[in-house]
Amino acid sequence: MLYLELFIQGIVQGSLYGLMTLGLTLVYGLLRILHVAHAGLFTLGGYIGVLVTNQTGSFGLALITAMVTVGVMGMGVYKFAYEPLLKRPPFVILIASIALFIASEEIFRIIFGPYGLSYENPPLKGQVEIFGGMKIKVGEIIVIGFSLAMLSSLAWLSKYTRTGMAWRATVSDPDIAQAFGVNKNKVRYLNFFMASALTATAGVFVALLNNLVEPTMGSVPSYKGLAIIVLGGLGNIRGTLIASLLLGVVESYGTIYLGKILDRDAIAFGLLIIVLMIRPKGILGEK
Amino acid sequence: MKSLLEIKNVTVRFGGVTAVDGVSLSLGKGELIGFIGPNGAGKTTLMRVITGMVKPNEGEVILEGKDLSRLPIHERVSSGLSLAQQIVRPLVSFHALDNVILACGKKKTENVLSSLFHKDTSEESEKAKDLLTQVGLADSFYNFPETMPLGHLKRLELARALALDPKLLLLDEPLAGLNQLEARKLSDLIVTLNQKGQSILLIEHNLKEVIRICKKIYVQDNGRFLAFGETAEVMSNIEVQNAYLGKNKNA
Amino acid sequence: MDYEITLLTTMSISILFALGLNFVTGFCGQISLGHAAFLGTGAYTSALMTKASIPFLITLPASAMTAGCLGFFIGLASLRVRHDFLAITTMGVGFLFVGIVRQQDFFGGEEGISGISSPGFSRFGFLLLCIALTLLFAFFSTAIKRSWMGRVFESIADDEDITSILGINVAHYKIFAFVVGTSVAGVAGALYAHHLRFIGPDSFGFVESVSVLAMVIIGGVGSVWAVSFSAALLSVLPMLIQFVDDYKLLFYSGLLFSMMRFSPGGMASIVKKMKTNNEKSS
């Protein structure tokens, strides 16, 4: 039974990783940026979720507000931080992004205080019994369901809508896409909006499951997020999802069996290094 | 005549596509052989097999009796191969002269420790200037690649390949992208090099120039051997004419 | 006087550490986002060995060796993974280092190791040792830069594939760069441990790795003296900006961001620009 429980916990964690890292992959796929500051947007999502829920009592409204606000912020990050640096060597953008992320943590701490915020009246806190008397939180079911819905609708959008096709064309060859009349900048803004909105939902859900948002809640996911997208084969969406779920499950078991040797957060990097030495371009990376 | 380069039965498959299919070729010391074939014939792939950038599924590459098949690129180069690539790739942070100097310093850079204890570049610098002058870049020693036109970059690529003192020089479409006059000048230079004793395998798409400068040619189509021999003889071969002209007619 | 000595010792160790990374990243173009792990390896080696009453003059080279051995493996890894993949792999090594150290009682776990014995010099003598080692490596670096090895490094940083087409064994050079750069970090780590007399897993985390990379980048990748200058400045910056106290990290990250955003070539490029402007105007 413990195995199954650990597995389900792993899937829940993996779904959250998926929501968060999908945006990282979208950004990397389009612009080859290792977008560490993404985790700052994740935390912002968490804060907005808690604040709006506490003010209005509506979790749904909070989720949507978080998505839209963070999405717009994400476009701002692109416009003011990344766009001017695109022609520079990649580590310049990477360091800028790390700096931006550290700054964001500090700003959260200064504005909201170091101890974090909680839901006054935590939504979706019930539990459901599934087979064998095992219990799972409603919140956790919602997380899995929501991730599935988001990801499949995203997949559908990218396959069957004009905008989606323009996006995919730009990812595979920006010059040719532009020659066919795709507006490169529009695609980039949209990309950052989607990426940031997705990570905002991850932030809202993490805050929900822990019933806590704090300034540093993004620090572990930020670097782990990079490990995940590299595992998945940088810029590869399917690979990222597989890596997210895989890591969620491995961590879930690993904490029990490897806890003496490694702390939980180092497991991701152990897995990462092993996989990269065998497949230098990640699980689904092209050769 | 003892052969310098011997390619035996090389086959390369990418996924389901056979890019090079059982190709064999031999080149004698001091020869200049033109290697031609229509687009998609597998010319560049074969070149990459020779240098080790592509690992063939089958076959061997032998230089002066030494089997190179399992060696990494840099060891093949130190065994006596050098390559001027079709898509020129100068080191962009080095000016033209430094690009060539680095290649001239082969002996000093072969071993990590010896590179640490050598600083002097006067000898290499002389040689590099000489080579750049030979290829007609006497005025561009201190130009950086981004400011140089394609014609000059092609020459720089050639000078850098020559700087390695190769037993065999591999030229991958050196004339591509050049206008008629430039192409003619560069092929004259290739002939001059050959007359000085340089063995050259010239992969080229520009049929006119190849026929003009090469005594012997090798033709490949769709990854397969088509013909090999004296230029005039090969060009009168019906299959060769079909491969080129037949296609052009249909196109 | 004590305060000044502490300040200068800190500076000197930081410069040595940054020059070690500069060797790998600045010279050879291999990014490392986990360099603090090698600082930590050196620090823990020396701390544990002195606890077993082995003299500092033996633990110092031993620290270089343990860090260098680890660096050798990262060098091997750099042959498999490149660019962004290498950045994340080295970052992973950093996290793995902290993750392992934190869980082992042998390394003092979460609490770290305190009461590390004095190296057996006066504080001033220790400062002189730090400065001497730093200067030694700085001169070694400049000598390398002018040698054939420097050319090869620059060429690898520019384009690895082309470098191997020029008949150069890229793998050997990359491994050499990693071994030297990480051994030096190990030495800096040993000095660090005996300077502060206390080490813990948090002293060698990701922020330290980013900070040292920032020193190299802000200085201007590859330029030995500019990197030394920026390392000296950034290492004491936290002490100099005590007055902003609660906003220290915000200030630091803001500065880092602005440097990247407005002068990504680092101080070396600013100086260069000023020079060319002067030449133009004169």
Image (cartoon, coloured by chain):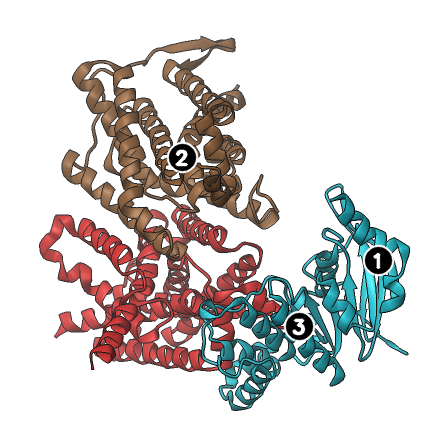
User: Is disc 1 placed on a helix, strand or loop?
Assistant: strand
What quarter of the picture does the C terminus of chain B occupy? top right
User: Is disc 2 placed on a helix, strand or loop?
Assistant: helix
Residue C49 seen? no
> In the rendering, what colour is chain A?
brown
Residue at position x 13%, y 58% from top? C241
What quarter of the picture does the N terminus of chain B occupy? bottom right
Circle 3 is placed at which residue position?
B184
Circle 2 is placed at which residue position?
A23
Q: CA distance from mark 1 to mark 3?
A: 30 Å
The quarter of the picture where residue B142 lies is bottom left
Left or right relative to B136: residue A230: left
Question: On screen, A36 above or below B143?
Answer: above
Question: On screen, A4 above or below C238?
Answer: above
Q: CA distance from mark 2 to mark 3?
A: 53 Å
> Marks 1 and 3: which is nearer the front?
3
Q: CA distance from mark 2 to mark 1?
A: 48 Å
- Counting residues from the N terminus, which is met first, the one under dot 1 or under dot 3? 1
Residue B23, label in figure: 1
